[in-house]
Image (cartoon, rainbow, N blue to C red):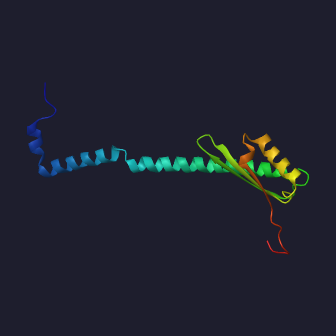
Amino acid sequence: MKEWFSLGKLKSLGMDKLIICLLVGIFLLVICIPTRARKEGEEEKKAEAGSEEIQTEVEVLEERLAAMLQKVQGVGRVEVMITVTGEYNQIEGVVVVAEGADLPQVRQDIIETAQALFPIAAHKIKVCKMVEESGGMK
């Protein structure tokens, strides 16, 4: 049986061809080894995509709550901000700024509406009176 690899064949290749083969082998190894930076980059992209998805979901909830509250008598114009935290996008707080928030019944209606829609305690819902815009300035 003939040997496919022998020192005699290696010596007959010549030093320059041997170095080229060695460098090509090292180059192939370097390309195949996964880098930490590549993994971190992929993780960052996944996190950003997840963050954007969460942001979109929160914006939809804010818009739906605002639309619902504007239908409640006495509330008037409204703006809503919802904060979420954690892996499961748990709602941490709700801020509602409404034109009619100076009336106690309207404040109570806003809090009860938010509690009916989201699993959140009343102390995590802040209702504020909206500042009236003066003249033609916005």
Residues 108 and 55: in front is: 108
Q: Is residue 47 left or right of residue 130?
A: left
- Whether residue 62 is visible, yes or no, is yes
Q: Which residue appears at 85% of the width and 60% of the height?
A: 99
| In the depicted structure, whether residue 127 falls above or below residue 8 | below
Q: Quadrant of the N terminus?
A: top left
Residues 97 and 87: in front is: 97
Q: Quadrant of residue 112?
A: top right
| In the depicted structure, whether residue 23 falls above or below residue 3 | below
Q: Is residue 114 left or right of residue 11?
A: right
Q: Is residue 111 left or right of residue 30?
A: right
Q: Position of residue 23 (x, y in %)?
A: 22, 50
Q: Tally the numbered discs.
A: 0
Q: Which residue appears at 30% of the width and 47% of the height?
A: 30
Q: Which residue appears at 42% of the width and 49% of the height?
A: 38
Q: Is residue 114 left or right of residue 5?
A: right
Q: Position of residue 37 (x, y in %)?
A: 40, 51
Q: Which residue appears at 11% of the width and 39% of the height?
A: 9
Q: Position of residue 33 (x, y in %)?
A: 34, 44
Residues 27 and 5: in front is: 27
Q: Quadrant of residue 132?
A: bottom right
Residues 8 and 70: in front is: 70
What residue occupies the far top of the structure in this picture? 1
Q: Position of residue 123 (x, y in %)?
A: 73, 47
- Whether residue 60 is visible, yes or no, is no
Q: Quadrant of the C terminus?
A: bottom right
